[in-house]
Amino acid sequence: MKLEFKYGTRNVPFDVVRAKRKTVKIVVSPPDQVVVTVPMRMSQKQIIDVVTAKGNWILKKIDYFKEIDYFPVKREYIEDELFMYLGKYYPLKIEYSSDIKKPEIMLCNDQLRIKTNTENKDIMQKTMEQWYRTMAQKVIGERVRYYQKFFNTEPKDIKVKEQKKRWGSCTYDNRLLFNWRCIMATLESLDYIVVHEMSHMHHKNHSKQFWSFVESILPDYKARKEWLRDNGIKMNL
């Protein structure tokens, strides 16, 4: 369902999704998409009133995306194209060979090297994504084990998956799920994501107690979180 609210002189359209929940969730995605998830029986007037009350925050997010000239990443998979890994950019080096059955990737000498038997960009993209997923599973697992000393509870599982709008999540039974794109972030910001989700094993919400717990482990978590806000849109293939 499409609705619209007015804030000052601006009319802002937004999408409404009804779900079995008690609270309203507002997500602003680049360049100007606003999605509002609401309880099943909430009236249109109530929805518009709640969203309008958050109008200043919503417009600030939309204007931020405009200010940084957001545009979707369009990869060419050509020589020396830059790809981000753990916060650093690496040039792509391509070696074509008919001797291999499928493309192979390795990080070597500050270069991201791909050995491939095809110039098909879709195949190269899938190969690259699988490499990122593999590295994310490895590194995130290592970081979870590193920070385990701060927690009395251990995660039931650690998985890397496709998550369009989240860096991670923690289920009710303490399974940790991470967006594979996290591996593109700096190690400091990746650690923030890890600690954030691990902290949900103790606090299932974003209460003051939750943020105090995160801060007790990462006193500079706000700076790490801000890096994600400023660079997150670049972390894609």
Image (cartoon, rainbow, N blue to C red):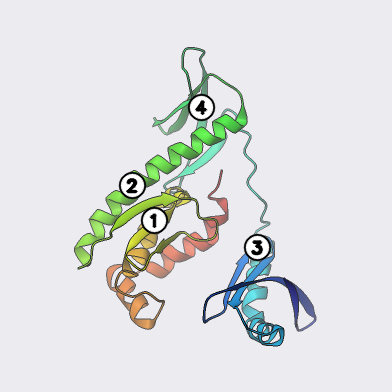
The residue tagged 2 is 139
> From the viewer's perspective, is the residue at label 2 or at label 4 nearer?
2
Residue 65: which numbered mark, if any? 3
Q: Is the residue 66 above or below the residue 112 in the image? A: below
| Residue kind at label 4, given as amino acid type | Lys
> CB of mark 2 within 8 Å of CB of mark 1?
yes
| Residue kind at label 3, given as amino acid type | Phe
Q: Position of residue 85 (x, y in %)?
A: 44, 44
> CB of mark 2 within 8 Å of CB of mark 4?
no
> Mark 4 Cα within 10 Å, few/some/many (few <14, many 20+)?
some
Residue 208 appears left or right of 69: left
Earlier sequence position, callout 4 versus callout 3: 3
**Foreground: 82 or 144?**
144
Q: Is residue 134 visible?
A: yes
**Foreground: 58 or 179?**
179
Identify the residue at horizontal 38%, vertical 41% (top origin): 135
Residue 210 appears left or right of 13: left
| Residue kind at label 2, given as amino acid type | Val
The residue tagged 1 is 190
Question: Label 2 to label 1, Cα distance in Å?
Answer: 9 Å
Residue 93: which numbered mark, if any? 4
> Mark 1 Cα within 10 Å, few/some/many (few <14, many 20+)?
many
Image quadrant for the N terminus? bottom right
Q: Position of residue 148 (x, y in %)?
A: 23, 60
> From the viewer's perspective, is the residue at label 1 or at label 4 nearer?
1
